[in-house]
Image: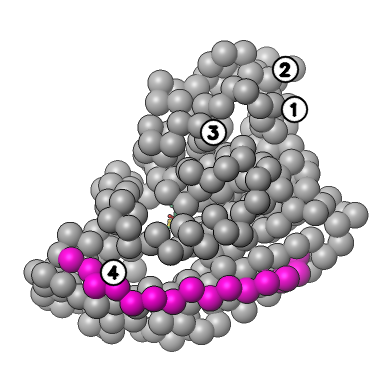
């Protein structure tokens, strides 16, 4: 937990600013939240979640961490670094933190999964890691972020518009047309609709945001057996698909796959309006 900067955190109960006193964050109405021993802050109230343990579970987080550590998504991390300037950055739906944990600037990563946030906090110490639900009012002050990053995660456009500075950018990462197409076709999972994901995402951000840039990233890579199994485990859509095909793929020593993402940059259409 970074205590050198004033963090734009708000109380999830009453929305007043939270002040930090060592490991405790407190609002003027005396609602208080303690930093966990791993260094993250849980601002998810019990009525803001649908299950006791929402979001990605431990096995998925571990698979995702191994997959990132293998370097398979390094080009995606590189693209995000290229597009993120210094300043205050929110990674909404940050997972285990690999995409934003090493960004320069003041990084706040947020996820509904406590396991994900715990893993991020243990690994990437300088950033601030928070358990919260993107789809609820966000525990952040108005106009406090220069960049909001949302990669393969749910988006709350009204709240993003409220907490982004008027000249800030929203970066959205979605799968590109042929993302994991080899794995999808072997597991009999439809590949339709991937062409339109970027247009769809940009459309859903209107009218608050307009797209200013779009960067496709596509590359081929050869996965080893561990990477194949981690990829299947970290991708829920693969779980229940063709058990036999899945078992067969899981035994392969290598598999060539296409990785394809699209990174959208969006800016506020009417920077004078903060939220709705
Ligand atoms: C596919 S993972 C992507 C993680 C990370 N952005 C990355 O690309 O490595 C989706 C993440 O969104 C989180 N998530 C799902 N619903 C959420 C919500 N309502 N609020 C916050 N995070 C959520 C999951 O727990 C998971 O960590
Ligand atoms: Zn409060």
State whether residue 171 is above or below residue 142: below
The residue at label 2 has a CB less than 8 Å from ligand 2: yes
* Real-space Cα separation, disc 3 to disc 2, in angstroms: 23 Å
* Real-space Cα separation, disc 4 to disc 2, in angstroms: 46 Å
Q: Quadrant of residue 31?
A: top right
Mark toward the start of the polypeptide (3 vs 4): 3
**Residue for badge 2:** 29
Q: Which residues are magenta?
A: 209-224
The residue at label 1 has a CB less than 8 Å from ligand 2: yes
**Residue for badge 4:** 238
Q: Please state the horizontal and vertical placement of residue 153, each as a whole percent of the image.
A: 51, 58
Question: Could you classify mark 4 by the number of other residues whose Cα lies within 10 Å: few (under 14), some (14-19), or many (20 or more)?
Answer: some
**Which of labels 4 and 2 is toward the front?**
4
**Residue for badge 3:** 128
Question: Could you classify mark 1 by the number of other residues whose Cα lies within 10 Å: few (under 14), some (14-19), or many (20 or more)?
Answer: some
Q: Which numbered disc covers residue 16?
A: 1
């Amino acid at each position: 937990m970074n205590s050198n900067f004033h963090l734009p955190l708000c109380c999830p109960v009453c929305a007043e600013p939270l002040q930090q006193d060592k490991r405790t964050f407190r609002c003027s109405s005396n609602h208080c939240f303690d930093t966990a021993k791993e260094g993250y802050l849980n601002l998810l109230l019990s009525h803001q979640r649908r299950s006791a343990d929402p979001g990605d579970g431990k096995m998925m987080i571990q698979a995702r961490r191994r997959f990132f550590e293998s370097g398979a998504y390094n080009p995606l991390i590189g693209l995000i670094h290229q597009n993120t300037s210094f300043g205050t950055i929110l990674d909404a739906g940050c997972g285990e933190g690999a995409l934003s944990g090493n960004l320069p600037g003041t990084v706040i990563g947020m996820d509904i999964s406590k396991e994900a946030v715990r893993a991020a906090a243990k690994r990437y110490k300088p950033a601030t890691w928070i358990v919260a639900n993107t789809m609820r009012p966000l525990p952040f002050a108005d106009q406090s972020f220069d960049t909001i990053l949302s990669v393969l995660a749910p988006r709350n456009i009204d709240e993003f518009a409220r907490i982004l500075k008027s000249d800030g950018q929203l970066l959205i990462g979605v799968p590109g047309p042929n993302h994991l197409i080899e794995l999808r076709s072997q597991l009999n999972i439809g590949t339709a609709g991937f062409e339109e994901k970027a247009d769809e995402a940009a459309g859903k951000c209107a009218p608050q945001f307009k797209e200013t840039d779009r960067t496709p990233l596509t590359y081929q890579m050869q996965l080893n057996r561990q990477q194949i199994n981690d990829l299947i485990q970290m991708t829920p859509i693969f779980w229940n698909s063709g058990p036999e095909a899945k078992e067969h793929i899981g035994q392969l020593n290598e598999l060539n796959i296409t990785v394809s993402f699209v990174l959208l940059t969006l800016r506020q259409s009417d920077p004078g309006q903060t939220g709705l």
